[in-house]
Image (spheres, rainbow, N blue to C red):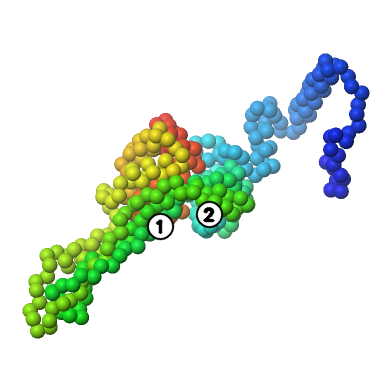
Amino acid sequence: MPSGNTTSRHRADAPVATTLPRPIRRAIGAGGLAVVLAGSLAFAATQPGSSAEQNDLTGTGVGSAANSLTGRTGVWDQASRSGEVTRDVLDEAGEPVTFTVTVDGRDVEITSNAGTLADALIDNGIVVGIEDNVSVPMNGVPTEGMDVQIERVGTQHGTETEAIPFETIERETSSLERGETRTETEGVDGTRVIAYTAVYEGGDEVSRTTQAEILVSEPVDEVILIGTADPASEPAPATSGSSGSSNSSSSSDDSAPSGSYSGSDPRGIARSMVEARGWGGDQWSCLDSLWQRESNWNPYAQNPSSGAYGIPQSLPGTKMASAGSDWRTNPATQITWGLNYIEGRYGTPCGAWSHSESVGWY
């Protein structure tokens, strides 16, 4: 290797050698290549601990050397969502550690016992593109308190959830005296999910294109009753169900999710997200079959034995917090996490479905 102050010479500046006939030059070149290869293999065979398998140019030896130089590979060995090993992983899972990942403008705290950083990120729905820059080796073991910085490069798919503010409506009523007010219906913000593609250069987002806007829930108007009755007059009977409706709504909001889901159709949300990622109808069919088997598309589905939760049956359910704090009740957040997990682990929904068909889980 030339020293730091050595000036490299362009190949056009090299001395001109005497030209030999082309057949002779080809023969010399082929012979030289054979000598180099033979010498390399002979040298490798003399090294301590070497074997035919380790030094097979088509085997794992070359890949391992490349990994040690770059710290990451095109495809990282990963463990399954359920914790079973799907490919060879050099580092066995140990005690859980907590570390922080800075990605896409937010800090995500992860607790994981995964054998590699790649496993921990994938299990938490964080997809790392092959061109992205990661501050620590992806095939390294996560450590307590580690700070991981992910710099996006190239085109990335993403989703974000937006609140749709509710409106306030005032209604006059003779059931209340003048000057009195009462909330008949509590206002509730609606929710929409925006699916987009973003282009990054040097870790900064330089452009963003909206692929789809998906309505998850309509906002509920807040209704305020304004009294009009004269204080001396007898108040009119309360409208049927006005106060009962308010109490019922409050009770429903406070109750923990259970049973079947009755909100916006999760299938419609998922299909829009699948199309926004550029996946076709065949991929949607695979995803529909996969999550029908896993949860029957119920955001409140919970496996009583393992504790897996939600539409994608995240294990544990708290992993979906990396996609949003409303992971327990919002199907869009669950679907976002699930699609990120599938993309990182299997590439496509059909890849995940094929694996599930083969072994019974994904």
Dot 1 crowding, Cα within 10 Å, few <14, some 14–19, many 20+: some
In the foreground, 172 or 100: 172
Indicate left or right for 270 with 36 as reference. Answer: left
Dot 2 crowding, Cα within 10 Å, few <14, some 14–19, many 20+: some
| Amino acid found under the numbered disc labelled 1 | Glu
Q: Which residue is mark 2?
A: 104
The answer to whether one can see residue 320 in this image is: no
In three-dimensional space, the C-alpha distance between marks 1 and 2, rounded to whole angstroms, equals 16 Å
Q: Position of residue 303 (x, y in %)?
A: 33, 46
Indicate left or right for 80 with 171 as reference. Answer: right
Indicate left or right for 88 with 37 as reference. Answer: left
Q: Position of residue 290 (x, y in %)?
A: 37, 37
In the foreground, 330 or 173: 173
Mark closest to the chain's N terminus, 1 or 2: 2
Q: Position of residue 342 (x, y in %)?
A: 46, 41
Tag on residue 18?
Answer: none
Q: Secondary structure at mark 1?
A: strand
Residue that sits furthest to the bottom in the current view: 232
In the foreground, 240 or 103: 240
Residue that sits furthest to the left in the current view: 234
Do tag 1 and tag 2 residues touch (Cβ < 8 Å)?
Answer: no
**Which of the image's four quarters has the N terminus?**
top right
| Amino acid found under the numbered disc labelled 2 | Asp
* Residue at the (92%, 23%) spot, across then down: 18
Q: Which residue is mark 1?
A: 162
The answer to whether one can see residue 18 in this image is: yes
Q: Position of residue 60 (x, y in %)?
A: 64, 32
* Residue at the (12%, 83%) spot, across then down: 231
* Residue at the (79%, 23%) spot, across then down: 33
Q: Nearer the viewer, mark 1 or mark 2?
A: 1
